[in-house]
Image (tube, rainbow, N blue to C red):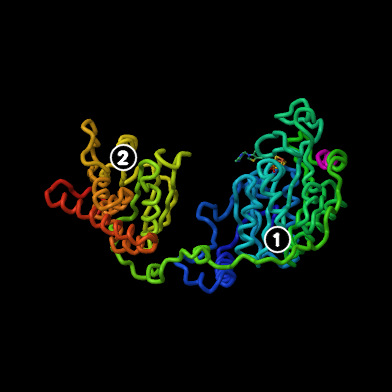
Amino acid sequence: MANESVIGVTDPETKSEVKSEVSSEVKSEVSPQASNDVYEPIHSKSPVFYDLYERKAELQHQTHYCPGCGHGVAHKLIAEALQELGLQDKTIFVSPVGCSVFAYYYFDVGNVQVAHGRAPASATAIKRSCPGRIVISYQGDGDLAAIGTAEIVHAANRGEKITVFFVNNAIYGMTGGQMAPTTMVGQKSTTSPWGRRPSNEGFPLHMAELLATLEAPAYIERVALSDNKNIMKARRAIRKALEIQRDGAGFSFVEILSPCPTIWGKDPVEARRWVLDKMIPTFPLNVFRDRRPEIPAGNEPPQRPVADVLGITPKAEARDVSKPKHAHHFKDVKIKIAGFGGQGVLLLGQLLIEMGMREGLEVSWLPSYGPEMRSGSAHCHVCLSKERIGSPLISHPDVLVAMNEYSLRKFAHEVASGGVILYNGASLPADFSAPDVQVVSIPASEIADKLGSTRATNIVMMGALLEETECLAPGTALSVLEDKVKKLNLLEIDRKALTAGRLFIDEQAHIGAVSQPDGFA
Ligand SMILES: Cc1ncc(C[n+]2csc(CCOP(=O)(O)OP(=O)(O)O)c2C)c(N)n1
Ligand code: SF4
């Protein structure tokens, strides 16, 4: 729990308990089908976090917050409430970007750290997938009332059953004192050096009042960390907000007026007094909402895997990855597919990752395309890996599938040494050269035309890719095509296109025109 003298994190034993408990709950909350899913939900601390957040010896007795900062007090009040209510093991804490970005080092609960302003959106997703958990979104005023205005308004308006603690210190602390939406009239900041003027910067936003205009929220209160009496009131409000969530009553929100001595240029005592004298008159303390919202019962979303709901679940045998159908002779393969919109560039990538999933590989697909639907340039990155994929972005592909000359010229230099370029063309452009890589020209468009549809060009290239690299099994390709292509005449053409692409490479190899590049079978 929050501890201002020792900054520790979950001990490994407790962590594993939480892990197994959460996993089993997720399974039971989703559906019996989910337990048959290919992937087990994993809830554990990311390896990028320190096991122990160790500070220099002389700093061990304090938090990373400045002396007198309200965040430390808010943390303590929240941690105490969680402990007193017995909610520690059920809680998932969503940390923001701001001075409290490291909140996950202070709370021995489930932790997620999210992008600036997005905490209520992430908290929504977490709460909806784990309705039995206590989900807390903790945010500063820059995070919640500037970049994240839309997220908080809509989460509140939907009546998400989460708790939001909004730490309002009237300034951007972490980035050095820029004006926040809550900066008060006349208050100086680095971006309002003459003091906030309504004529130029508008008026401060009153978030508690604003959210109280909505129908859905169950509880909204503003409190202040100005003096002991108000801190005790803050303590009660924090506790109540958590109780409301525990009881499933709806959205709860506590705005906490909080000192930021460093940016305000005051000592800790002066800063507290400033909250009392200056902030409270601008942001009056009040309970703005305390009731159970009357939200008509509707059709609850089905707690089933999205693929099942959309009716796109692959056949049972296709999902069975217990026995790999294909020997993968690689650790990972990075493929870039590039061409014009309309050439099936993105679809080819999607088919490959679907195949990879069915063969038990980790996969990723990252598309990139312009605003034009047809004829604009498009490309996608596909990773097939035996290990978890760090980034879906590929700088140096092992394989480039260039669907046109423009893509060949544009991306050939990126291909890793020993890699392969598969080019859709009867022959390479005369002045083209790519040392250190294997380049194969495949007249895929002509082949597809002869089979009855230019649209099958990408499938000819897929056949060539499978034959050339042996990264995935042709049988898997067929089963994916059978699931995805609904029109029988097109499916027939695609089957032939796949075979034709493979045969083309096979024949080239027999006449010695194609050699196996490094790294592939
Ligand atoms: C997308 C994005 N935009 C801007 C930033 C820079 N940034 C980091 S924290 C912050 C504001 C922090 O202020 P606040 O939310 O009030 O929290 P405090 O530091 O005062 O606790 C900003 C603008 C960022 N990290 N990410
Ligand atoms: S800059 Fe302000 S908000 Fe940030 S840690 Fe220091 S006192 Fe706290």
Would you name the residue on which mark 1 appears?
161
Q: In what element is the residue under mark 2?
A: loop
The residue at the point 30 percent across, 51 percent down is 453
Q: Position of residue 427 (x, y in %)?
A: 21, 39
Q: Position of residue 113 (x, y in %)?
A: 60, 51
Which sits earlier in the primary sequence, circle 2 or circle 1? 1
Would you name the residue on which mark 2 appears?
404
Q: Is mark 1 within 8 Å of ligand 1?
A: no
The residue at the point 75 percent across, 46 percent down is 70
The residue at the point 42 percent across, 56 percent down is 388
The residue at the point 52 percent across, 56 percent down is 46
- Can you say whether 325 is above or below 448 in the image? below
Distance from disc 2 to disc 1, alpha carbons, whole Å, reads: 51 Å
Q: Position of residue 85 (x, y in %)?
A: 75, 66
Residue 271 belongs to magenta span: yes
Q: Is residue 367 left or right of residue 228?
A: left
Q: Residues within 10 Å of mark 2 (few under 14, many from 20)?
A: some
The span shown in magenta is 269-275
| Label at residue 492 | none
Q: In what element is the residue under mark 1?
A: loop
Q: Is residue 438 left or right of residue 155?
A: left
- Can you say whether 84 is above or below 465 in the image? below
